[in-house]
Image (cartoon, helix red, strand yellow):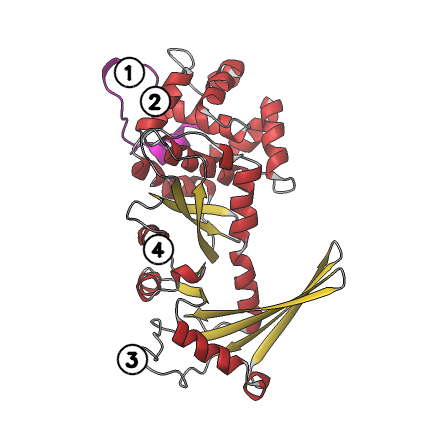
Amino acid sequence: MQSWFEKAFDALPDPRTGNAKRHDLLEILTIALTATVCGAESCADFADFAVDREGLFRSFLRLENGVPSHDTFSRIFRLLDPVAFAACFGRFLEGLGTAGAGVIAIDGKTLRRSFDDAARSNPLAVVTAFASATRLVVGQHSYRVAEGDSEILAARALLECLDLQGHLVTADAIHCQEETARLIRKRGGDYLLRLKGNHPALLAMVEEYFTDPELCAGLASATTTDADHGRIETRRAWVCHELDWLRGPKAASSEPVLLPDMACLGLIEAKVEHRGKTTVTRHYHIASRALSAADYLAAARAHWSIENGLHWVLDVVFDEDRARNRKEHGPENLATLRKLALNILNRARRDISVRRKRKRSGWSDDFARSILGQMR
């Protein structure tokens, strides 16, 4: 395990000086990551876990000066360069296996309790790239809410760091921007972006097009139906690959802004029947790949895996929304640590849930070794 960890984090600079380097940085990170996999949620938890499971750690770590204290863990995560720590994702994924081809979903999340009133620091927000097929986090970029940065700029900074060759990048309407689309294409990927009111002229034209029954009748379509807990959802998609009817680049306020390399427009109509009530919603998308109707439906649905496969798990299983780390770089670095732990958990024992894997890893050294063994 240590050789794999050294490969992933050997370029991470140690922020400590002099006698503060009593404990090896990589050993501190290894303990913190293992503890997080096993259910720990704070620096105090890391220290307690290290004391209680010292025997487990001594089986693969030197621990020349014993186990680190709570203050040591806290100091490390407050001082670590968050950009350098987050950059370790690439080498980390090499140890776990590649993210695979398919959909990469981009979305932002605010860490609700990461504000610091005393330091007049706003909450931390994190934009994450999530590989839907393998359920792996492939990168993240953070920013402070209302401090001159935005989710749009953070997403672009993240995309700049990713190899998107062969991937379809999905994102909400906030990222339906010319520069973002151009960046995705530059990095070798294709985009599938939600179209809403931030492109009013283009949205109006697309809505008008898809409300023409004669035009829709000639388009390729696909339908899926899901039933669960008395709720029936029927989703039907139409795709349009002939885009000559759209006008050119923006020349007046009434003309649409077209994204680079647009190859497909899509409509998904979702009809939900529940307790005798029926609701119908329509969603529009723009893509640079000429998707079939079935592939379009699948890709749009895959985007929401970032909600139930990442954000929900972080909030409910890792209790991220109640994390109270606020000082210096602590919130950002611990957010990275949680995602590293989630990647490990998602790659191992896929027959059971992340919650069960965390609990059983905390209860049993043997089970913890079965989860952590993949990192050797």
Please tell me whether mark 4 or mark 3 is closer to you in this view: 3
Kind of residue indicated by mark 4: Ile
Q: Name the residue located 63 percent from the left edge and 40 percent from the top edge.
A: 353
Q: Amino acid at mark 2?
A: Arg
Q: Which mark is residue 152?
A: 4
What element does badge 2 sit on? Answer: helix
Q: Which residue is mark 1?
A: 20
Rate crowding at label 3 as few (under 14), some (14 to 19) or many (20 or more) other CA atoms within 10 Å: few
Q: Determine the image quadrant of residue 196.
A: bottom left
User: From the viewer's perspective, is the residue at label 2 or at label 4 nearer?
Assistant: 4
The residues bearing labels 4 and 3 have C-alpha atoms spaced at a distance of 25 Å
* Quadrant position of residue 357: top right
Q: Is residue 85 magenta?
A: no
Type of residue at label 1? Answer: Ala
SS at mark 4 in the image: helix
Label 4 vs 3, first from the N-terminus: 4
- In the image, 97 versus 256, the foreground residue is 256
The answer to whether residue 195 is above or below residue 46 is below
In the rendered structure, which disc, 3 or 2, sits on the residue that comes first in sequence? 2
Drawn side of residue 52 relative to residue 264, left or right: right
Q: In x, y percent, where is residue 326?
A: 38, 30
The magenta segment is 1-23
The residue that mark 2 highlights is 75
Q: Residue furthest bottom?
A: 214
- Classify 10 Å Cα crowding around label 4: few (below 14), some (14-19), many (20 and above): some
Furthest residue in direction left, as rendered: 18
Report if the CB atoms under discs 2 and 1 are less than 8 Å apart: yes
Q: Which mark is residue 252?
A: 3
Return the residue nearer the eye: 48 or 344. Answer: 48
**Distance of mark 3 from mark 2, alpha carbons?**
55 Å
Structural distance between the alpha carbons of marks 3 and 1: 62 Å
